[in-house]
Image (tube, helix red, strand yellow):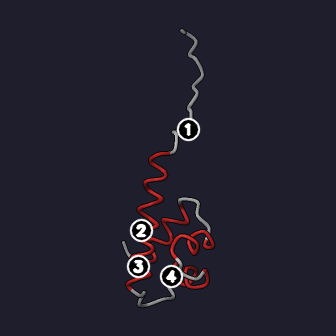
Amino acid sequence: MKPRELVLALRAMGLTQKQIEQRTGIPQPTVSKIGLGRVGDVMSRHYLALLAAYEQRVREEALEPAPQVFRQPSVNE
């Protein structure tokens, strides 16, 4: 994934730019610029921090309980 895709994925997973800053150490304004595609060359340490935050969030989501899905009983039940 590219840095912008990582920021967008983390945002889609429910993280705010401030939370991404807290997880990666990348200042929020820089997170915003990366997400908007306004940073042409992301430092490798920032890329690695975004990748680690993404992988961590994926692991967290895997451990979250699945939402309960209730269905209406059919007429024949």
| Residue density around tag 3, few if under 14, some if 14–19, many if 20 or more, within 10 Å | many
Residue that numbered label 3 is attached to: 47
Identify the amino acid type marked 1.
Pro
Say which mark, if any, is on residue 52.
2
C-alpha span from label 3 to label 1: 32 Å
Q: Where is residue 68 shown, x and y percent of the image?
A: 56, 33
Choose the circle earlier in sequence order: 4 or 1.
4
Say which mark, if any, is on residue 34.
4
| Residue density around tag 1, few if under 14, some if 14–19, many if 20 or more, within 10 Å | few
Identify the amino acid type marked 3.
Tyr
Q: Where is residue 8 shown, x and y percent of the image?
A: 50, 69
| Residue density around tag 2, few if under 14, some if 14–19, many if 20 or more, within 10 Å | some
On screen, 30 above or below 50? below
Q: Quadrant of residue 20?
A: bottom right
**Between tags 2 and 4, which lies in front?**
2
Residue that numbered label 1 is attached to: 67
- 47 lies left or right of 11: left
* CB within 8 Å, label 3 to label 4: no
